[in-house]
Amino acid sequence: MQHYSGFGLLKHGLSHHENWQRMWRNPVPKAQYDVIIVGGGGHGLATAYYLAKVHGITNVAVVEKGWLGGGNTARNTTIVRSNYLWDEAAWLYEHAMKLWEGLSQDLNYNVMFSQRGVMNLGHTLQDMRDIHRRVNANRLNGIDGEVLDVKQIQEIVPHMDCSANRRYPVMGASWQPRAGVARHDAVAWGFARGADALGVDLLQQTEVTGFRISGGKVLGVETNRGFIGAKTVGCVAAGNSGVLAKMAGFKLPVESHPLQALVSEPMKPILDTVVMSNHVHGYVSQSDKGDLVIGAGIDGYNGYGQRGSYPTIEHTLQAIVELFPIFSRVRMNRQWGGIVDTTPDACPIISATPVGGLFFNCGWGTGGFKATPGSGHVFAATLAEGKAHPLAAPFTIDRFISGKLIDEHGAAGVAH
Amino acid sequence: MLHIYCPHCDEYREEEEFRPKGEAHIARPADPENTSDEDWGNYLFFRKNPRGLHHEQWFHSAGCRKFFNVTRDTVSYEILETYKPGQQPTVTAESRQAQASAQASNQGAAK
Amino acid sequence: MSQRNRLATGGRIDRTRPLRFTFNGVSFQGYAGDTLASALIANGVDVLNRSFKYARPRGVVTAGADEPNAIVQLGATEAGQVPNVRATQQALYDGLVAKSTNGWPNVDRDLMGVIGSLGGKFMPPGFYYKTFMSPASAWPKYEQYIRKAAGLGRSPRETDPDIYDHMHHHCDVMVVGAGPSGLAAALAAARSGARVILCDEQEEMGGSLLDSRELIDGKPAAEWAAAVVAELSALPDVLLLPRTTANGYHDHNFVTLHERRTEHLADLAPLANGRRQSRARMHKVRAGRVVLATGTHERPLVYARNDVPGNLVAGAVSTYIRRYGVVPGQRLVLSTSNDHAYRAALDWHDAGREVVAIVDARDKPDGDLVAAARSRNIRIITGSAVIEAQGKKRVTAAVVAAIDIAGFRVKGSTQELACDTIASSGGYSPVVHLAAHTGRRPVWRDDLLGFVSGGVPGQIPAGGVNGRWSLRDAIADGFECGVRAAAETGLTAGTFTLPTVAPVREGKPVALYQVPHTKAAMRAPKQFVDQQNDVTAAGIELATREGFEAIEHVKRYTGLGFGTDQGKLGNINGMAIAARVTQQSIPDVGTTVFRPNYTPITFGAIAGRHCNEFFDPRRYTALHGWHVERGAAFEVVGQWMRPWYFPRGNESMHDAVQRESRAVREGVGILDASTLGKIEIQGKDAREFLNRLYTNAWTKLEPGKCRYGLMCKDDGMVMDDGVTACLAENHFHMTTTTGGAAGVLDWMEMWHQTEWPELEVYFNSTTDHWAAMTVTGPNARKLLTELVDIDMSAEAFGYMDWREAKVAGVPARIFRISFTGELSYEINVQANYAMHVWKALFEKGAKYDLTPYGTETMHVLRAEKGFIIIGQETDGSVTPEDLGMQWCVGYKKPYSWIGRRALTRPDTKRSDRKQLVGLKPLDPQVVLQEGAQIVLDKEIKVPMPMVGHVTSSYFSPNLGHGFALALVKGGSQRIGQTVYLPMADGKIHAAEVVSPVFYDSEGARHHV
């Protein structure tokens, strides 16, 4: 792998950038792999990378029906945080957070992880109780967090309207300083480059059309490029998990919904952190390019169309203008939609399935991006060991039968 | 924004008047106390979530306050029919497939 | 400065109405009818901005929505600031103030430009992914510098004083674009009797007709446009919307239109009749058929240093000359791949300025326009192209060479042609954006060298966007599509004859996108593809070398198409370059995906009036005015404003709540409980329905009685609670939580309509009909007795009874229920009598010191009794058993009520679930924080195993100490144990686990 550095950039500049190598190969599928990952998004690529790097399993294929990182990895609003309420979720996301903190160096690829903090606003007394509850839990779990009063909020976000005459005045906020944003595409590309360098085959334009299953065990995947064998198959295909499960003959407690987001035109920096409000229902940050990156909640109906309904955009911007009346004259440049796989408890599923050797990592709902390295790390361990990584263990499908849900709806009320 | 025909009102109305209520035709087990944990879990949480034709429930919450069913394509968002609770869909994934293959064979014959 | 590029005559500007404006602090003059761009060109201003990455000087490239460079900051005042205005679409108005968005100290001498020109070499696409990584701790510093360079314009720092509104429309035919085909389509549809809406983004309707050289019915094309607009505007069922952009096309033929109502007049919306007009309006249109008459965008050619000011697309040159009476230079070189672009040279020549040469990539151009150029003795260099522009802040020369398009190389030697303007045309891209917004991929057509609509149900592309490019074809197609659209909505075609347009013979264009240079693309001077994002041909080539082969990868790696012009100018060229270097065809590289908006529009317009007081309605009780008068502090509960506490004088909240709490326990207090949800339930199966809905039994509840009920979801988790009274055998009055009322009604409707339609039962919300007043405390009966006409004695009116009575002469229902643990009566009267009754109660209550109390005191009192609040003690993961409310669970009810089955799942059966308990801090002065987490062992270091959290916590004047409710793992088995609460400030509180009922556990006080 070509090492990236500032010096390298100078050197390549002098040779007219004609000597940069490919970041990944475009290999022909082998007949058999040790492990196949279905889905070449951030989570799938991270899984492949950690399989190779941590577990030494390099005979791995990532099968992607389109282009690498082309699903939700390319469509999210790039927020990274770990201030989840319940222990199981908090540990999983904090595991990811720790990996984020060294990811650029680990991958030798600058994923522009920017710890500019995430603020969750409270607008009612119950919001504030929930904020205290969550921040206290985070603190005792070793996750950074504090509760801010309005004055402290205004110091960090001077342009937000915290006055008492708003419809839902801001009463306080939770604040996670280590949280922030990252460059979403770079995460996929960095993991792809790292995995490829360790020998993983990244098979783009390769669509899984079925699973070959015998005696209750998976033998490999049927694709538009023919059969590819592997005794261990991990599906990490957000937005299509249900479709893949159907191919394998079972249902998942997952529903796919449109999740919309939008950006403004690029503007000079005016907002230095991520501001989220469950109650007023919207969130906003400003990218390094200057765009305000904005989102809210899912559309209520099932949809695979990568688009939602217009009123959702209207409500989202009403919330943003309510929080930041000065943004009223700012223009929305572009909107888009992703397909998110939601679960009944707003927590993911990282689990064995009724089919031997076939594992699923799905149901990240609106919050998958922030988990990318952690998800890949624990899923890689799960695939390598054939049993759940301890941090993944609470996230089995069984919980929807036993009732042991990890209900994070409070934490995931707005998509992020 | 979807344009939805309410079979109770006999009118097309804007999506904003309605609320989606998830998959239709999920029967609550008739004898819950003698239903296994697994079947109860299936009833509560496991859904078809199809990519393509879907039969789903909608509620005309800011209209006639009645529930009804919609057959909708979850990719194109085309609504193929709406019908009242208790009724069965006339367009299904199977019927659509049969229609498509009939059309294909007709075209084949025409050629 | 004089308008040195302004022609003495011609154009559609009004030379009798000069307008003053300021750009970068310099005052200029233009005319009514100008855009900011045309006025700047008229005044000879070349450099309008600096580019984003390399800070290169940039000027106007186009005359419309596709403009990448002429982006300015508008606004004379802080509140009137508008970032990122396209000068090519901004109408000039008197007093307009604009600035470049980039450039320091100014746009002409930009220091960043030095860095850009020196460092540009080392800033290929994605360079930031490859560096700034070590040391890791330095990244935030690096990022600060990256952020400094971010953005174009700036947000205002003051609140927008303007308002924006929304209108909803239904129509038969929505026509987008009022050029030749759009006007024809609208006319055809309107004459067929259709309700038509026609919108156009420009200041004036007519589109390309406004700068056409052609004649319609023997008259200038603009006259035909004016005639059609006049006919349409006289029709009652036609709505004409100029300055209105169809910014989004959504499912089921829903189109959003953004109308700029005042942006052509001033920064801030002017007053009309003393009132502020709406600055912009969103029209939300549900159309029977949508005719897309959006035309085409011209593609510039991609040659070296094609971003130097003075490089324009050919069509823009014609537009500036013919529409605005402005020639953007003195000496023109035109580089083209097609006949149509010859118009630029003809217009330039006819304006009396020098056309140095037309450089045509084709070997044998031979159409009518070519002939017209020849007849003017304009030099035509064939088989060649401009391969490089020279000059820094303005073009000084064009480098021209013969090219081998198929071999992608320059043939032979180059020549320099001195000039100050280079116009280029690489063909025309249909504006298919609205056809792609609902996910339908556009389809490539080799004959057009462009993408056309992939076919959207209900949408009809007409004219240019449909590949019918000549004026004659566009009008004919427009008529045809208008008739078709009307017919498809069930109308019959009206009568009309097509206007006469002489055919123009055009030669076949050649496919040319990136122009070869004498040096390889990676070594040649920068050839810009997307000027706003500084994306170059070499950058695209590099991306593909590095493995980014899918067009989406190329776009994301290079930034192609992510500017505010959304790639209108550059996307197809970028795809063509990616296709060339990966040796694929353009459609193989991918299709472009377009998302709303077509052009950016303000948040304010999208939000409309749903801000400030209209963001979400505030609900007030019938007694609100009284509460305000009494100086109540309010709490937001759902949409309701509820009195939180009633401070007397300078009393603190704590003191007020302590006083109110004591008053209820010792005398009598009163609460406005009107916000509780109320649902009337009737029908012969009402009782059975309640049995299925609530966890407890309702079979034996007699008329005149009330009962508390708990509701679960079918997963066994508590969702709501409240008291329901039996009014008559088949008639019940249910109360719900304040926030849960609407959801509970929906919930009941769902179960009834979809699961149990056989039950005869009806529901109706009566929340707003009844005002509710809770009179509670030892003196409650004494007080009420003075105002009612019934026997209030304990024998006649027992606990959990309700009675009809007159209170202060008003018909009322009195419920003897208690949420405080004291003797309590909840009086319900018709809401519009409430104030009378309330005041009468205070009149009679003065001698008992009747004390109004708010939600905070309500919380203290109910918590002392261990009563739960839904959403505070519950969070969707709590069962009735977790709350210790087994007494409220009808285990023996025959029907398996909602939630019952789920209570016997493995996880809900566990005995060590989190259960509701009381906490008594060991230090009686301590009031635990609501939300504090509970641990068993305070010595363990973080991460500490947590066993639960505090749900409610108060200081009780009645108990004399702080107390709390909490959910604690296995809590019911921990009574008497000490638990710890480590706080953020380092303190660790200790508390004893006790029963959640702190006060009057026998219930003696309300059984009197």
Image (cartoon, helix red, strand yellow):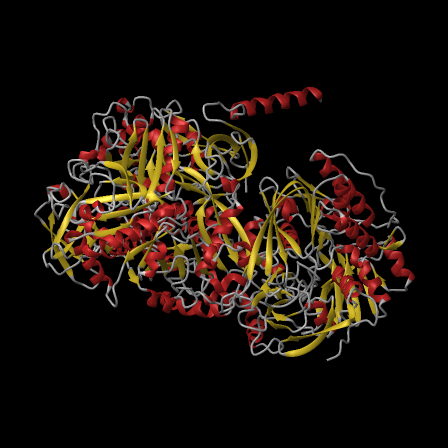
Q: Residue at horizontal 89%, vertical 58%?
A: C372
Q: Is residue C673 above or below residue C98?
A: above
Residue depicted at 21% across the width and 43% down the height: C818
Give the quarter of the image for residue C66: bottom right
Q: Quadrant of the N terminus of chain C?
A: bottom right
The answer, for residue C418, to whether it is visible in the render is yes
Q: In the drawing, does residue C330 fall left or right of residue C675? A: right
The answer to which of C865 and C250 lies nearer the viewer is C865
* Residue at the far right in the pictured view: C375
Instruction: List x then y, in percent, for residue A253.
Output: 37, 35
Please determine whether, in this image, residue C977 is positioned above or below residue C892.
Answer: below
Counting every numbered tag in the picture gives 0
Which quadrant holds residue C925? bottom left
| Residue A379 can be seen in this image | no
Nearer to me, C161 or C826: C826
Q: Quadrant location of residue C174? A: top right
| The C terminus of chain C lies in quadrant | top left
Image coordinates for residue C753, horizontal then vertical, percent: 41, 28
Image side of residue A95 versus residue C441, left or right: left
Residue C36 vs residue C13, the one in the foreground = C13
**Residue C612, percent from left and from top:** 46, 59
Which sits in the foreground, C346 or C609? C609
Residue shown at 51%/51% (left/top)?
A: A314
Relative placement, left or right, of A123 versus C307 is left
Can you give x and y, in whole percent of width and height, for residue C985 in the image?
A: 20, 64
Q: Residue furthest left?
A: C976
Q: Is residue C311 left or right of residue B104?
A: right
